[in-house]
């Protein structure tokens, strides 16, 4: 079956039952769904007739990542969003969180490259099986790729800014005692 759409999500936790139901529905309609969920995931991928179009990978490494990235494609259109919230009931229902579109093409390109790198990780990645067990990804003759190491190396190369001097840092404002 050809895919009618594509969803890639990168976050820490996915346990909201309503969101999981919608992902199952999308899978049943032929949408390819790739989830990069570091921690707890209440969805079961690979269930025939329900979630065979869904893969779940967890990347465990030296850094505890907190990015929440959402990529949606279909009908020739693609959209990228960033968020402060994982898909958990407490975050979606009880907190004030941000979910906003990324509109600049250069930022969309960079974020898609981050997702592609995470999906190619064959060092720290584990794939969730239909039975709920994670199986470590093997390089299978490919060069080892740690997404976390790749992100670290990129940050070292391009992020070499000097820390702000004490004079330029934000200073808290205090209310004068009356």
Image: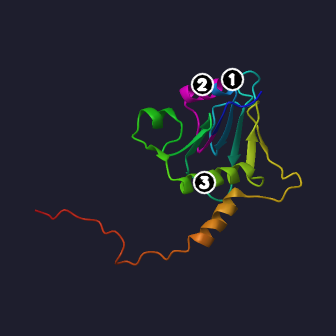
Query: Residue 45 versus residue 4: which sits nearer the camera?
Result: 4
Q: Residue at x 67, y 24 (%)?
A: 29
The location of residue 169, given as percent across then percent down, is 36, 72
Q: Earlier in the sequence, mark 1 or mark 3?
A: 1
Which residue, as the protein is rendered here, is positioned at the far left? 178
Image coords of residue 41 (percent x, y): 63, 36
Residue matched to label 1: 28
How many C-alpha atoms fall within 10 Å of the one at disc 3: few (<14), some, or many (≥20)?
few
Cα gap from disc 3 to disc 2, whole angstroms: 30 Å
Q: Is residue 105 above or below residue 131?
A: below
Q: Which residues are magenta?
A: 8-25
Residue 21 marker: 2
Q: Residue at x 74, y 51 (%)?
A: 120
Residue shown at 42% from the left, 42% from the top: 97
Disc 1 secondary structure class = helix
Contact between marks 1 and 2 (CB within 8 A): the answer is no
Q: Earlier in the sequence, mark 1 or mark 2?
A: 2
- Residue drawn at point x = 62 percent, y = 72 percent: 157
Residue 15 in magenta stretch: yes
Residue 53: % across, % down:
73, 31
The residue closer to the viewer here, 165 or 72, is 72
Q: How is the image coloured?
A: rainbow
* Mark 2, secondary structure of its residue: helix
Residue 60: tell me if it is visible.
no
The residue beneath circle 3 is: 109
Q: Earlier in the sequence, mark 3 or mark 2?
A: 2
Q: Specify the quadrant that holds the C terminus.
A: bottom left
Secondary element under disc 3, as helix, strand or loop, is: helix
């Amino acid at each position: 079956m050809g895919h009618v759409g594509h969803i890639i999500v990168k976050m820490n936790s996915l346990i909201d039952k309503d969101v999981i139901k919608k992902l199952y529905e999308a899978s049943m309609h032929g949408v390819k769904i790739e989830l990069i969920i570091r921690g707890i995931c209440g969805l079961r991928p690979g269930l025939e007739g329900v979630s065979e179009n869904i893969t779940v990978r967890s990347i465990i490494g030296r850094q505890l990542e907190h990015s929440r990235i959402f990529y949606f494609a279909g009908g020739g259109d693609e959209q990228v969003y960033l968020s402060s919230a994982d898909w958990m009931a407490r975050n979606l229902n009880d907190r004030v969180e941000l979910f906003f579109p990324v509109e600049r093409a250069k930022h969309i390109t960079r974020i898609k490259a981050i997702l592609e790198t995470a999906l190619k990780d064959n060092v720290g990645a584990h794939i969730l099986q239909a039975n709920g067990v994670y199986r470590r990804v093997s390089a299978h003759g490919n060069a080892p790729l740690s997404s976390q190491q790749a992100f670290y190396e990129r940050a070292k190369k391009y992020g070499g800014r000097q820390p702000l001097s004490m004079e330029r840092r934000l200073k808290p404002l205090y209310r004068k005692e009356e």
